[in-house]
């Protein structure tokens, strides 16, 4: 499938492009801010960012992982993902939760790496899990066997060794006979049955295994490498376009080409990495899934390319504006919680508790006890002192967060 990256009307897209770029620039400038009216050390984290900005960045990874699976038709609760990330599950992890955690780890890896890493051949191979695939499939050269000039005469074996060798020889003969019988063709097979048997043999042969794994799970005719080359060709053709227009075209090309069979969620992350590489976003990795979740599916999958591109641009704008409101909410909550640090001793665990609750959508007593190295009773006391709200409404396995 060939994607036409020039099939759009720029006149219809100018207004959404300007609005999306403006919202994204405001969000990135807000996240890069290190202080208001001078350096305020109490409001800054170890990296120099404001605590609420750093907390939003950590929270966005959790929310984007859940939203990515929501777009794929799967439901994962944020509190389950937070506890699973801390290895403190209250129930057996589901397959969807495991996938969400893989998305979370991938997003953290891209955000912590240089801007050019994710779109480099080395980064793409790592994100696809293809490290060592070529080495495993390539034939291993065999070294010539050096035989000594003087060979010693073999020693005579015992009776037990001879009997064991005879048993092995009989077993080899039985295996050879069974293999010959299995390879014999069936009597007068029908053309339909013969074709099905050939397809089954072709799928089960070791020579046709895909680099990704078992052909029962990965379609050998999908050709992920070829589709990835088509997507990168689209990226090369959009390098001279404005960043947000290029991002919309790359996202639409990913949706149409579908390069990866089981990692479709990787597309928005690569689009966000392109924006980082082109210095459109410097302080964060773009979070587009939250905005795409608010866009109806019939617009995201419309036949008209302008409708799809406009849907992505509106999703980027909606996500950026919602993120700005979330940062304002975290900033207000931080100011209220920091008022309770007055007259506290220098070894108090309350500042660490504030940082923890800002960086997680919700926390539990066991999670606080593990992160702050306090007892469960002490963790509950810290939660009570901050006055955060309980979010589950349960009597057991409770969790608290900023509402």
Image (cartoon, helix red, strand yellow):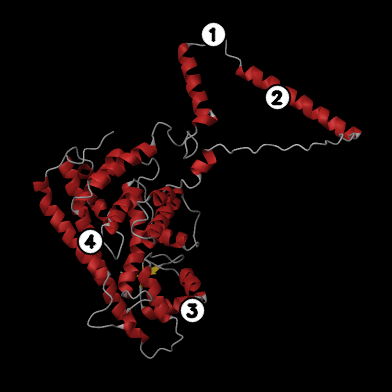
Element at badge 4?
A: helix
Residue situated furthest front in the rendering:
149
Element at badge 2?
A: helix
Element at badge 1?
A: loop
Q: Nearer the viewer, mark 2 or mark 3?
A: 2
Element at badge 3?
A: helix
Q: Is residue 356 left or right of residue 201?
A: left
Which of marks 4 and 1 precedes in the sequence? 1
94 or 113: which is nearer to us?
A: 113
- Tell me the residue that label 2 is attached to: 175
Question: In which quadrant is the N terminus drawn?
Answer: top left
- Tell me the residue that label 1 is attached to: 188
- Tell me the residue that label 4 is attached to: 320
Which of marks 3 and 2 precedes in the sequence? 2
Tell me residue 53's x, y (percent).
Answer: 30, 70
Measured in 3D between alpha carbons, the distance from the residue under mark 2 to the one under mark 3, in whole angstroms, is: 67 Å
Measured in 3D between alpha carbons, the distance from the residue under mark 1 to the one under mark 4, in whole angstroms, is: 67 Å
Q: Residues within 10 Å of mark 2 (few under 14, many from 20)?
A: few
Residue at point 21%, 54% (across, down): 243
Q: Give the quadrant of residue 165.
A: top right
Q: Is residue 132 above or below residue 400?
A: above
Residue 69: mark: none
Q: Nearer the viewer, mark 1 or mark 2?
A: 2
Residue 342 visible to the viewer: yes
- Tell me the residue that label 3 is attached to: 378
Residue 321 visible to the viewer: no
Measured in 3D between alpha carbons, the distance from the residue under mark 1 to the one under mark 3, in whole angstroms, is: 78 Å
Which of marks 4 and 3 precedes in the sequence? 4
């Amino acid at each position: 499938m060939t994607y036409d990256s020039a099939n759009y009307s720029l006149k219809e897209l100018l207004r959404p492009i300007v609005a999306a770029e403006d919202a994204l620039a405001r969000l990135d400038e807000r996240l890069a801010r290190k202080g208001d009216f001078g350096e305020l050390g109490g409001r800054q984290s170890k990296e120099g960012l404001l605590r609420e900005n750093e907390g939003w960045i950590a929270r966005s990874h959790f929310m984007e992982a859940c939203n990515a699976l929501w777009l794929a038709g799967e439901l994962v609760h944020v509190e389950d993902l937070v506890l699973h990330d801390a290895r403190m599950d209250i129930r057996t992890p589901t397959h969807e939760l495991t996938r969400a955690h893989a998305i979370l780890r991938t997003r953290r890896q891209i955000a912590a790496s240089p801007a050019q890493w994710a779109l480099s051949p080395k980064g793409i191979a790592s994100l696809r899990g293809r490290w060592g695939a070529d080495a495993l499939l390539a034939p291993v050269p065999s070294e010539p066997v050096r035989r000594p000039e003087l060979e010693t005469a073999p020693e005579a074996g015992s009776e037990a060794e001879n009997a064991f060798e005879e048993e092995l020889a009989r077993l080899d003969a039985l295996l050879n006979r069974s293999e010959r019988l299995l390879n014999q063709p069936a009597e007068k097979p029908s053309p339909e049955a013969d074709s099905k048997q050939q397809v089954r043999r072709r799928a089960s042969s070791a020579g046709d295994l895909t680099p990704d794994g078992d052909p029962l799970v990965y379609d050998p005719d999908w050709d992920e490498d070829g589709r990835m080359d088509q997507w990168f060709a689209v990226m090369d053709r959009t390098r001279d376009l404005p960043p947000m227009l290029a991002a919309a075209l790359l996202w639409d090309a990913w949706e149409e080409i579908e390069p990866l069979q089981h990692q479709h969620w990787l597309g928005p992350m690569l689009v966000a990495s392109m924006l980082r590489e082109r210095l459109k976003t410097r302080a964060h990795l773009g979070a587009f899934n939250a905005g795409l979740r608010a866009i109806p599916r019939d617009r995201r999958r419309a036949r008209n390319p302008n409708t799809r591109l406009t849907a992505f641009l509106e999703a980027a704008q909606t996500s950026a504006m919602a993120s700005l409101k979330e940062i304002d909410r975290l900033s207000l909550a931080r100011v209220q919680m920091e008022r309770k640090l007055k007259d506290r001793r220098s070894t108090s665990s309350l500042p660490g508790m504030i940082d923890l609750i800002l960086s997680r959508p919700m926390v539990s007593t066991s999670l606080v006890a593990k992160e702050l190295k306090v007892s469960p009773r002490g963790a509950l006391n810290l939660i009570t002192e901050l006055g955060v709200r309980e979010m589950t409404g349960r009597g057991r396995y409770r969790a608290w967060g900023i509402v």
